[in-house]
Image (cartoon, rainbow, N blue to C red):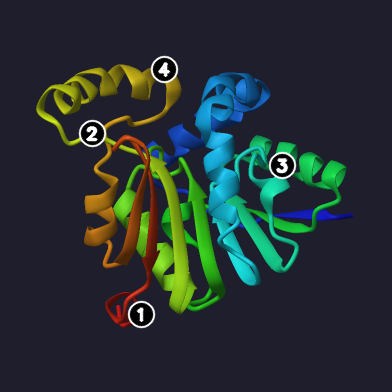
Amino acid sequence: MSAQTRKTVEIRDRTTIITQRHYNLLTVIYDLRTYIGENYGFRKFRKEMWSRLTSGRVLEVGVGIGQSIPNYPKGCQITGVDISEEMLEFAKRRAEQLGVEIDLQLMDAQNLTFPDNSFDAAVTSCVFCTIPNPVQGMRELGRVVKPGGDIWLLEHMRVDKPIIGSLMDFVNPLALRMMGTNINRRTVENVKLAGLEIEQIEDLLGKMVRLIHAHPTPFIHNH
């Protein structure tokens, strides 16, 4: 079997439980739900991001239904975690069909159960728009990635312009209710609040979709 799953999660936060239920329900239509975004940019963006990794132990947080699996570098040992049991089962089937080895685990990104310094790199794709406490989730990435390791965040976020930003703020409650997604997260600011060191930010779709390359800092590993 090329993919294996383990259930190792304990969730106490009500908002996180709601998020988990939402994505369990979305699993069967998730490919359709993300069809436009995938075909008009995100598939290409994801492929480009994964091309930056060549070796080592890599953690994908928010592996979902496994849309990144076709892009996994052959020289990497991949662990994928997600809050949704149903999505992990979908990802497992996709990995098996593609013959890709991956360790899939049910886990809350805000409370990763891995020891400190477990991975050489961590990757996310449109994950920190849904995690209830994004700063805590980013701190966890900084904790489990080795000092000097790479953290790659492909995320959509709030556009910091008066009209567009205000409109995104206004629409966000509806987007959150309908899609389980916050469209106005200030992700760059959250990365800084989490204590990660930003090396580079690439604008992929204006300021709305960006690729952030960051590293853990001694501050994270000392707390």
Q: Quick check: marks 3 and 1 in contact, CB under 8 Å? A: no
- Residue under numbered circle 1: 221
Residue with the mark numbered 2: 159
Q: Earlier in the sequence, mark 4 or mark 2?
A: 2
Q: Image point 44% across, 32% down: which residue?
A: 18
Which residue: 28% across, 62% down? 194
Q: Which mark is residue 91?
A: 3
Along the viewing direction, whichever of 104 and 170 lies nearer the viewer: 170
Q: Spatial distance from mark 1 to mark 2, Cα to Cα?
A: 31 Å
Amino acid under disc 3: Ala
Amino acid, disc 4: Met
In front: 222, or 123?
A: 123
| Amino acid tagged 1 | His
Q: Residue 75 placed where, x, y %?
A: 72, 68
Comparing 218 with 106, the one in front is: 218
Q: Nearer the viewer, mark 4 or mark 2?
A: 2
Among the two numbered marks 1 and 4 on one chain, the one whose residue lies closer to the N terminus:
4
